[in-house]
Image: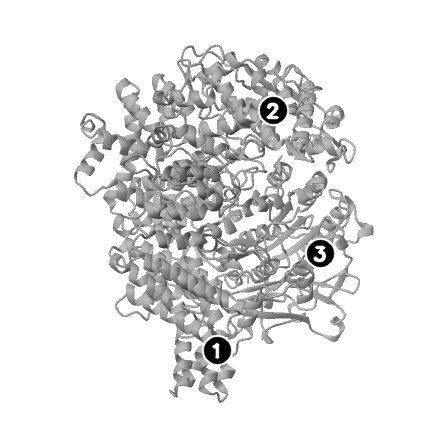
């Protein structure tokens, strides 16, 4: 059974903001990297491992997993937890205040019933056996099939007889084909059909006695799970706790008492950890009294503390605890200074408890976690506030009257985290804080400019990350951008406005690519930025827009090359990467450029040199120069574009596509005939205005270059629909309700068969992500039931297309591999070295939730640590080694060969952790509000609704490190990663077989499987034919 | 465009040491100055029927007149039904056209019980694309059953693949001559999720494009598409250009879904296939029988395009020669878009951009 939210619901999620949309499913708890220890409640594993109690699942496990929508790759101990989660999250829907069972749950129940019937047929031997066709009746009845023709006829086959049962039969993967063959040949059919046994958390009876749901059997844990949502939620929540914590809760609070708060524990329980009978509170032992004050119970009374935490303030207190616990220890220490912890909680509760934190389908207040994760502090302990008090008084409006200190501003932001908006004070604060943080004091932005930026946030906020990525851009440049952008918004003609916006944004995009690749000298970043945008100020006529685009591009080219005036091929080469010296580097760069050219070709875009030469030719003719023949030839090239063959009439499109308008842009191009203008006698004015007709073409080509650069691996639209780039709607002409056209693009038109295909509406500010989102579903999962998770995949794809490796030395690449190996080495050594173990676990506790640390601790103390170490994520081992070398620089010589080799490299001085972080990290456009790359040392973020679901993807930073390790192993050049990373990422995505959106272990398995397959395939490379059909 | 790359001139040039095999080539007609030549063979699958829809068999190459952008073309190979291809000049003259009754609704038997005699066909590569989206949910088991019957009945086709689609494509059974593998694939499909028919049909056309020989795609769908990001017209165009015939079987009545109906009819027609609207299981099996019958009666005709400066869409017309044959109807694709074919350098990883077939 494969199940999913209806598309309309998914679209609603996609369209909703990061800070809103709390009503839908797939809410989050912490990641489940690896299975939790399953154990008897009375005997924690660390003390006395014992065989776990088991739950009986009727029929083969494979069939049950299919029906339950659980990955076939989960280990047995994760089966019941994943089932519990699925039942809790998608087994029910709420309408008009009533809880309704979904089709998923109904089918699963029916399947269990059918499986039990089949098991009876299988008998004690556990084999369904049909010796002769004539004996098949009872089995066929259960299966819901019958024979079309009597037994013994060769061409007989099975046909459905009872649709309900038949559906279960095929959906659960019963071997119908083999049965059919046996019946056709009147031979014996034997099918092992045994029940499966999977571990249970605690004793099943501990659970079955808890359910209060009427009308369900309380004998069997499986039946109780299938019949009670809260119960399923509680089971799932407990499965995410570490054993000691789970035991304390079960014993001292009791499962029955926890049942009403199951959803709170489910969402906000994963950071709760009990050790030696007391709760480990965020901020450490010094914070115990503060937490006692908030919760009303001492953390030394673990059970009472946790129970109070869960049941008070309708889940908001638990949310607060969870949020503080998720940030790193340095941040936690800030929150427990003075009475900040209490004051911030009071601020959070300003909006009361009308809305429960544990209700709905998603965690609440994602902004609070962002704020607490990213807040910076001054040396005196005060929060660092961008700008000044007056700025925030203005931003906060009425609420601003009460703020007079940085501390109060910070508290006001905490209060704002509960507002469901994308444009509230907190969002402005987060954006400006990141901007402030990225800049040295010499480059800090004045409060006056920050005020302007705050005022313009709703309109232009999505472009601020570029000022974060390039702190060299001065506040003059920022102001200039805002003024030019506002002036373009004043163009009355929406078509022209869209073209002007597209051309300027595309040129900024080209500037950004060249700047990111180091092709614009650092000392010219600021001046070149202004030269790129200045020409667009106050343009109002088509010819002015053309001239501005021409001049803007020309000056950009002059910045990166000695003489400017590049052909399209030369421009693409530059965008592909900086010129290379090695043969391998040249080859890789040519391959990247080749991919870009294929996009330009398949989008059937007029080359930029044709357009500019034609524009110059018309200009020359207007001034009396005789360039008629040359210009005529160029003008003829414009008319080579052919629209796809029509399948619908215009009337049908108007009838079937609401608001159908959007191929106007392409139609204008189709009807542009400059040949006629040039052939006929024309005045200077007419020739001059003819240049204005080139504006749509210029926009498409420049925008196309941006699309081509960020082409996601495995993309199809870019190669098949030549209207994709042309349809980009920069001025929201084709849709209603888009107020801010400078905000990131959204995909429109999916599923509108007569609409000409999906297209983007909005700006280019977030192009890599939105292109990835458009193309993601073309990746065909390798496993039958695997879904391409929309919450994760676009981020993975975008990270793979943004990252480029042109300035990496082989030593740096080798260092990245060594960091990972060194981390593994440290962990292996720590198994026999308690002091080292304490050090490494302390380091890893910054990145891993408490229950994972506990699991690792148990593993390192036992005999199975090697397997556990091998499963750790590359980002974790990398982080461990880099931190260890930083904090214990003198201990390395006594460690293993990888650490010694890494030590040697570090001592040679050319490996800088900041550069490695920048080169092999991933962009965090939501978390850090920049496309600059970085490796972060934070715990993974949970799933949120709206655009905050991107935090999930931004938490996965292992790919680049792992691909680098593979490249190093193969002795490939660093430049090869420019090809490898997108391809391996695509392959990895096809291999993801996850049970839920936060199934991190599925990502890890897929990543390693992709690496393994690549290594196996490496030797098999052959030349291939490459046509449009094959791109 | 059925791009069968004939490299004989390429090899000759390589022997002469005139150029590197790694360079990008273009067709001779695009750039006469280049030495490297690629000749593209255009293959047409042509159904000839009388006014009642009965298939006309026994026609010869000289009975057909083919033009591309009104430029007459010379037939290179000619094949009828499942017979092996022949050079046009090898086909013996003198055979008589005959009319074979088509499978009709009233005379058909359920799948798996084919009493209608059909011509064998041995060289078709059949891709079955099965809608397993939420739209198909209620009729899923019957649909699965009908497809299983269809696969069983394709005894002569050289290879069959079974793909399923919902939001993503699933390559359930790769192109194989092993029917049991395909049948197991049919039975292993699972229902659920949104429907991206045209996205997945695009990927299927691309897979088919990599296969040499005759290829057809049989789409079995409930009709609606709520998720595709590519429009049907570009998929149809690619199918035309790659010489892939698309048959579409809808499980809805035509009038209930006008947009899908329009697409199904027009897309299949443009590629030389047919659309069927089967509101119940019986109709579905009849549709499959009709497709099987059609496959057995297609003339396969190929030609090397005569020089033509047009680098965009090239229209193709196929007509019958002789007054007595004007009463017959012809169904085939009506053109293709010339594609530039490039031979890339050695792929860096060995498994570059292709979609992988399980």
Is A149 left or right of A284, judged from the image as shown? right
Is A837 drawn above or below residue A962 in the view shown? above
Instruction: Say which of A119 and A164 sits in front.
Output: A164
Q: Chain of mark 2?
A: A
- In the rendered structure, which disc, 2 or 1, sits on the residue that comes first in sequence? 2
Is A607 drawn above or below residue A959 in the view shown? below
Which residue bears the numbered disc 1? A636
Image quarter hosting the N terminus of chain B = bottom right
- What is the quadrant of residue A927 in the picture? top left
Local SS, label 1: helix
Q: Point out residue B142 in the picture as x, y percentages from the top left corner.
A: 72, 40
Badge 1 density bin: few <14, some 14–19, many ≥20, Cα 10 Å: few
Measure the C-alpha gap from mark 2 to mark 1.
69 Å
Does mark 1 fall on the same chain as mark 2? Answer: yes
Q: Chain of mark 3?
A: B
Instruction: Say which of A1018 and A986 sits in front.
Output: A986
- Mark 2 vs mark 1: in front: 2
Measure the C-alpha gap from mark 1 to mark 3.
39 Å
Does mark 2 fall on the same chain as mark 3? Answer: no
Local SS, label 3: helix
Is A309 drawn above or below residue B203 in the view shown? above
Q: Which mark is residue B261?
A: 3
Local SS, label 2: helix
Is A873 left or right of A260, judged from the image as shown? left
Instruction: Say which of B281 and A948 sits in front.
Output: A948
Which residue bears the numbered disc 2? A230
């Amino acid at each position: 059974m494969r199940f999913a939210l209806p598309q309309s619901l998914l679209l609603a999620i996609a369209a909703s903001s990061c800070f809103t949309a709390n009503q839908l499913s797939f809410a989050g708890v912490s990641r489940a990297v690896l299975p939790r220890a399953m154990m008897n409640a009375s005997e924690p594993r660390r003390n006395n491992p014992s065989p776990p109690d088991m739950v009986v699942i009727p029929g083969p496990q494979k069939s049950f997993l299919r029906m339950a929508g659980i990955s076939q790759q989960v280990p047995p101990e994760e089966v019941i937890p994943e089932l519990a989660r699925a039942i809790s999250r998608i087994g029910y829907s709420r309408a008009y205040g009533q809880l309704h069972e979904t089709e998923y749950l109904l089918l699963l129940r029916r399947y269990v019933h059918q499986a039990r019937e089949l098991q009876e047929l299988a008998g004690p031997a556990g084999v369904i056996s049909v010796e002769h066709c004539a004996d098949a009746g009872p089995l066929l009845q259960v299966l819901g099939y019958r024979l079309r023709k009597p037994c013994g006829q060769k061409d007989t086959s099975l046909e459905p007889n009872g649709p309900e049962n038949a559906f279960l039969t095929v959906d659960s993967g019963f071997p119908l084909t083999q049965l059919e063959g046996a019946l056709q040949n009147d031979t014996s059919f034997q099918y092992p059909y045994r029940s499966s046994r999977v571990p249970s958390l605690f004793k099943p009876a501990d659970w079955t006695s808890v359910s209060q749901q009427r009308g369900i059997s309380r004998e069997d844990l499986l039946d109780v799970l299938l019949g009670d949502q809260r119960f399923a939620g509680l089971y799932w929540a407990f499965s995410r706790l570490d054993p000691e914590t789970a035991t304390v809760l079960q014993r001292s609070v009791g499962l029955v008492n926890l049942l009403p708060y199951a959803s709170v524990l489910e969402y906000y329980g994963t950071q709760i950890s009990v050790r030696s009978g007391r709760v480990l509170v965020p901020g450490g032992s010094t914070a115990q009294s503060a937490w006692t004050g908030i919760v009303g119970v001492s953390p030394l009374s673990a059970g009472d503390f946790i129970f109070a935490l869960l049941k008070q303030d309708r889940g908001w207190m638990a949310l607060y605890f969870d949020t503080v616990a998720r940030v790193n220890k340095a941040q936690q220490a800030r929150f427990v200074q003075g009475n900040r912890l209490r004051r911030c909680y009071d601020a959070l509760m300003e909006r009361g408890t009308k809305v429960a934190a544990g209700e709905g389908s998603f965690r609440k207040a994602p902004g609070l976690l962002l704020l607490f994760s990213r807040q910076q502090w001054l040396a005196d302990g005060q929060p660092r506030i961008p700008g000044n008090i007056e700025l925030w008084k203005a931003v906060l409006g009425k609420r601003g009257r009460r703020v007079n200190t940085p501390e109060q501003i910070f508290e006001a932001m905490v209060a704002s985290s509960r507002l469901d908006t994308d444009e509230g004070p907190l969002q402005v604060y987060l954006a400006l804080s990141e901007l402030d943080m990225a800049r040295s004091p010499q480059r800090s932005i004045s409060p006056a400019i920050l005020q302007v930026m705050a005022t313009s946030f709703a309109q232009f906020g999505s472009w601020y990350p570029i000022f974060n990525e390039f702190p060299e851009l001065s506040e003059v440049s920022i102001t200039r951008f805002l003024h030019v952008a506002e002036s373009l918004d004043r163009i009355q003609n929406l078509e022209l406005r869209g073209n002007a916006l597209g051309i300027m944004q595309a040129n900024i995009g080209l500037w950004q690519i060249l700047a990111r690749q180091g092709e614009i000298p650092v000392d010219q970043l600021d001046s070149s930025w202004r030269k790129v945008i200045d020409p667009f100020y106050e343009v109002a006529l088509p010819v002015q827009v053309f001239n501005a685009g021409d001049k803007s591009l020309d000056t950009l080219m002059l910045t990166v090359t000695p003489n400017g005036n590049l052909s399209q091929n030369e421009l693409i080469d530059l965008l592909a990467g900086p010129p290379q010296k090695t043969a391998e580097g040249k080859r890789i760069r040519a391959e990247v450029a080749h991919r870009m050219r294929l996009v330009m070709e398949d989008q059937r875009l007029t080359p930029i040199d044709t357009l500019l030469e034609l524009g110059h030719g018309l200009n020359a003719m207007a001034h009396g120069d005789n360039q008629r023949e040359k210009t005529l030839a160029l003008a003829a090239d414009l008319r080579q574009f052919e629209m796809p063959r029509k399948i619908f009439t215009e009337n049908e499109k108007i009838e079937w596509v609401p608001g159908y308008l959007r191929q106007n842009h392409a139609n204008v191009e189709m009807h542009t005939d400059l040949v006629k203008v040039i052939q006929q006698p024309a005045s200077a004015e007419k020739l001059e205005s003819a240049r204005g007709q080139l504006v749509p073409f210029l926009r498409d080509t420049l925008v196309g270059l941006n699309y081509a650069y960020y082409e996601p691996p495995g993309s199809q639209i870019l190669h098949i629909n030549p209207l994709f780039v042309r349809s980009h709607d920069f001025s929201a002409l084709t849709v209603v309700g888009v107020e801010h056209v400078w905000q990131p693009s959204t995909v429109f038109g999916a599923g509108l068969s007569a609409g000409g295909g999906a297209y983007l509406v909005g700006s280019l500010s977030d192009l890599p992500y939105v292109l990835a989102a458009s193309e993601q579903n073309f990746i065909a999962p390798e496993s039958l039931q695997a879904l391409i998770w929309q919450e994760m995949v676009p981020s993975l794809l975008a990270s793979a297309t943004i990252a480029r490796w042109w300035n990496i030395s082989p030593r740096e690449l080798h260092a990245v591999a060594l960091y990972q190996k060194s981390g593994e080495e440290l962990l292996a050594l720590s198994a026999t070295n308690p002091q080292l173990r304490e050090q490494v676990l302390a380091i890893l506790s910054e990145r891993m939730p408490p229950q994972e640390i506990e699991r690792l601790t148990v593993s390192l103390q036992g005999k199975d640590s090697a397997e556990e170490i091998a499963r750790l994520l590359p980002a974790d081992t990398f982080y461990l080694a880099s931190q260890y070398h930083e904090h214990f620089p003198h201990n390395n010589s006594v460690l293993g060969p990888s650490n010694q080799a890494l030590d040697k490299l570090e001592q040679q001085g050319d490996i800088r952790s900041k550069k490695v972080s920048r080169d092999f990290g991933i962009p965090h456009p939501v978390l850090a509000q920049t496309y600059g790359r970085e490796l972060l040392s934070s715990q993974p973020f949970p799933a949120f609704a709206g655009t905050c679901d991107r935090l999930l993807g931004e938490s996965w930073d292992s790919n680049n490190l792992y691909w680098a390790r593979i490249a190093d192993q193969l002795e490939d050049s660093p430049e090869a990663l420019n090809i490898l990373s997108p391809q391996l990422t695509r392959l990895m995505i096809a291999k993801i077989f996850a049970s839920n959106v936060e199934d991190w272990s599925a990502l890890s398995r897929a990543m390693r499987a992709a690496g393994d397959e690549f290594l196996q395939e490496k030797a098999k490379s052959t030349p291939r034919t490459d046509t449009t059909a094959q791109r | 465009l059925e791009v069968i790359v004939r490299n004989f001139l390429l090899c000759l040039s390589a022997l002469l040491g005139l150029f590197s095999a790694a360079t990008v080539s273009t067709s001779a007609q695009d750039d006469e100055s280049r030495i490297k030549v690629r000749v593209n063979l255009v293959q047409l699958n042509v159904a000839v029927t009388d006014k009642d829809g009965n298939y006309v068999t026994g026609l010869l190459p000289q009975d057909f007149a083919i033009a591309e952008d009104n430029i007459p073309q010379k037939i290179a190979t000619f094949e009828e039904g499942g017979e092996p291809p022949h050079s046009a000049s090898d086909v013996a003259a003198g055979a008589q056209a005959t009319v074979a009754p088509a499978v009709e609704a009233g005379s058909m038997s359920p799948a798996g019980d084919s009493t209608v005699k059909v011509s064998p066909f041995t060289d078709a590569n059949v891709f079955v694309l099965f809608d397993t989206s939420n739209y198909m949910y209620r009729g899923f088991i019957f649909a699965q059953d009908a497809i299983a019957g269809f696969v069983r009945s394709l005894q002569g086709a050289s290879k069959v693949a079974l793909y399923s689609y919902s939001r993503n494509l699933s390559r359930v059974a790769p192109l194989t001559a092993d029917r049991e593998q395909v049948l197991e694939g049919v039975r292993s499909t699972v229902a659920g999720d949104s429907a991206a028919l045209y996205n997945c049909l695009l990927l299927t056309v691309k897979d088919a494009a990599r296969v040499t020989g005759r290829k057809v795609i049989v789409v079995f769908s409930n009709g609606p598409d709520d998720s595709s990001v590519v429009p049907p017209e570009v998929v149809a165009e690619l199918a035309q250009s790659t010489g892939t015939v698309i048959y579409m079987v809808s499980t809805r009545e035509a009038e209930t879904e006008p947009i899908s109906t329009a697409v199904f009819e027009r897309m299949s027609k443009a590629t030389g296939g047919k659309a069927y609207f089967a509101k119940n299981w019986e109709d579905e099996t009849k549709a499959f029988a009709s497709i099987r019958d059609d496959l057995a009666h297609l003339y396969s005709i190929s030609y090397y395009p005569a020089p033509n400066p047009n680098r965009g869409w090239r229209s193709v017309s196929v007509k019958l020669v002789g007054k007595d044959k004007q009463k017959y109807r012809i169904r085939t694709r009506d053109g293709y878009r010339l594609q530039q074919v490039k031979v890339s350098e050695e792929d860096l990883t060995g498994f570059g951009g292709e979609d992988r077939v399980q």
